[in-house]
Image (cartoon, helix red, strand yellow):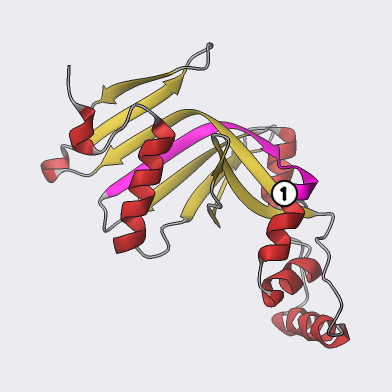
Amino acid sequence: MENYESFKIKNNPFETFDEWLTDAIVVDDNPWAFALATSSKDGEPSVRYLLHKGIVEDKFRFFTNYSSHKASDLEENPRASMAFFWRNSKRQVRISGSVKKTSRESSEDYFNSRDLESRIASSISTQSAPIESREVLISQYQAYLKSLNDSEEIKCPENWGGYELSPDKIEFFIYGEHRLNDRFIFSLDDNGSWSIERLQP
């Protein structure tokens, strides 16, 4: 039986991901960035980049505006795929599974950990909605900033928070010479156990 350890593939996909991310942090720019693909109930696909905010109880976490296009997709079709591409590491990871919102407490805790400017930006934005101009957006930001006093807290907006993706498939991909790439896929069975198999390039 092949020894996957030589490819830094552990028996547990989450341990493998953590090790790969740790490697990417050293050599890749913004290794936390990932593409999130969603689909409407009618099957219309959409993809965009977000930031990975950690694995919590075997779930991949990210945060966004609940009024956004992606949130609308996830309301209609609560499944999604994530893709990490680490160019310098010559690796990528694809993850697919079901998605649900984090607890309100978790959303507020993360929101309150962000810098002031990011909290203001999230508070004034109705993400994905049309706006007259860039100048209007900047004006709204500056007005909000000016209205704050030293002791005032910026509360997490009701339409902002986190999601958690519970994976059922995680694929690890290593770029090889002559396009002889190495691919390993973990699949979750009905009993909650992960199996692993090698895929052709």
> Which residue is at a point 53% across and 48% down the rendered structure image?
54
Along the line of sight, the residue nearer the viewer: 163 or 176:
163
Q: Circle 1 sits on which residue?
A: 106
Image height check: is 140 above or below 169? below
Looking at this view, name the residue that lies furthest to the front: 151
What's under tag 1, amino acid-wise? Ser
Residue 105 within the segment the image draws in magenta: yes
* x and y, in percent, of residue 96 in the image: 51, 33
> Which residue is at a point 79% across and 47% down the rendered structure image?
104
Residue 156 within the segment the image draws in magenta: no
Query: Dot 1: within a 10 Å radius of its alpha carbon, few (fewer than 14), some, or many (20 or more) residues?
Result: some
Horizontally, residue 80 falls left or right of residue 133, namely: left
Along the line of sight, the residue nearer the viewer: 51 or 140:
51
Q: Main secondary structure of the magenta part?
A: strand
* x and y, in percent, of residue 157 in the image: 82, 60
Observer able to see residue 8 = yes
SS type, badge 1: helix
**Span of residues in magenta:** 91-106
> Which residue is at a point 74% across and 44% down the rendered structure image?
72
* x and y, in percent, of residue 71 in the image: 71, 46
* x and y, in percent, of residue 62 in the image: 61, 50
Count of number-bearing discs: 1
Horizontally, residue 81 falls left or right of residue 174, namely: right
Quarter assignment of residue 13? top left
